[in-house]
Image (tube, grey):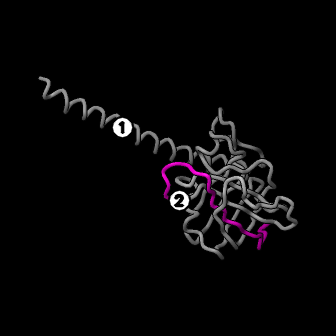
């Protein structure tokens, strides 16, 4: 009898782990559906729409890099809960399209995984929840220490920074950040 218990226990543990992995991916996929729906309703109504009733954040923008097929919804703030579901807008920075620097941060292994494929010169499109659309061109990137970003919030230009942890392939968190800088090149209204 003990011979059969060990394979049975291993099979049960494997099934539980597999189910947990499926659940996490299903939850993430469903959250993205709810975020897209809430963002679209925000644009249509001009009102802040939370993706689910207990959310502590809401969609404020959509980032698209069409050359590589990337699209993600940006959330208000950078709390741990917000970053679990999408990029967050750093509170102390301006909205996209305004004079100053709009800064969005996200995890390197999920919502900003696509940053590794963005090239200098690529167009980054931002649609805000008020329906206004802005086009930025990626003009530089850097790897910096987390407390030495070099971002100048007092700039008079309209700029965008997308930031995530570095290196992209790391398993553990570290002190370095990848910063992609872009400058406003067009306003679609």
Q: Position of residue 82 (x, y in %)?
A: 64, 43
**Residue 173 magenta-highlighted:** yes
Q: Quadrant of residue 162?
A: bottom right
Q: Residues within 10 Å of mark 2 (few under 14, many from 20)?
A: some
Q: Which residues are magenta?
A: 168-189
Query: Quick one: SS at disc 1?
Result: helix
Q: Residues within 10 Å of mark 1 (few under 14, many from 20)?
A: few
Question: Can you identify the residue that label 1 sits on?
Answer: 17
Question: Can you identify the residue that label 2 sits on?
Answer: 168
Residue drawn at the location 81% of the way across and 61% of the way down: 152
Residue drawn at the location 87% of the way across and 60% of the way down: 154
Residue drawn at the location 48% of the way across and 51% of the way down: 171
Q: Quadrant of residue 9?
A: top left
Question: Foreground mark, 2 or 1?
Answer: 2
**Residue 123 magenta-highlighted:** no
Marks 2/1: CA distance?
Answer: 25 Å
């Amino acid at each position: 009898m003990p011979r059969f218990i060990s394979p049975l226990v291993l099979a049960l543990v494997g099934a539980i782990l597999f189910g947990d992995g499926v659940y996490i991916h299903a939850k993430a996929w469903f959250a993205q559906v709810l975020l897209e729906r809430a963002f679209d309703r925000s644009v249509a109504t001009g009102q802040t729409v939370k993706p689910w009733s207990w959310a502590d954040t809401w969609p404020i923008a959509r980032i698209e890099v069409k050359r590589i097929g990337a699209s993600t919804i940006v959330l208000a703030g950078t709390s741990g809960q917000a970053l679990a579901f999408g990029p967050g807008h750093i509170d102390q920075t301006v909205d996209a399209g305004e004079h100053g620097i709009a800064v969005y941060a996200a995890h390197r292994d999920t919502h900003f995984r696509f940053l590794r494929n963005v090239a200098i010169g690529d167009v980054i499109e931002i649609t805000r929840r008020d329906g206004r659309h802005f086009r930025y061109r990626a003009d530089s990137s850097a790897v910096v220490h987390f407390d030495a970003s070099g971002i100048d919030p007092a700039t008079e230009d309209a700029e965008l920074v997308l930031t995530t942890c570095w290196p992209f392939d790391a398993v553990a968190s570290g002190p370095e950040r990848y910063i992609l800088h872009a400058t406003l090149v067009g306003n679609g209204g």
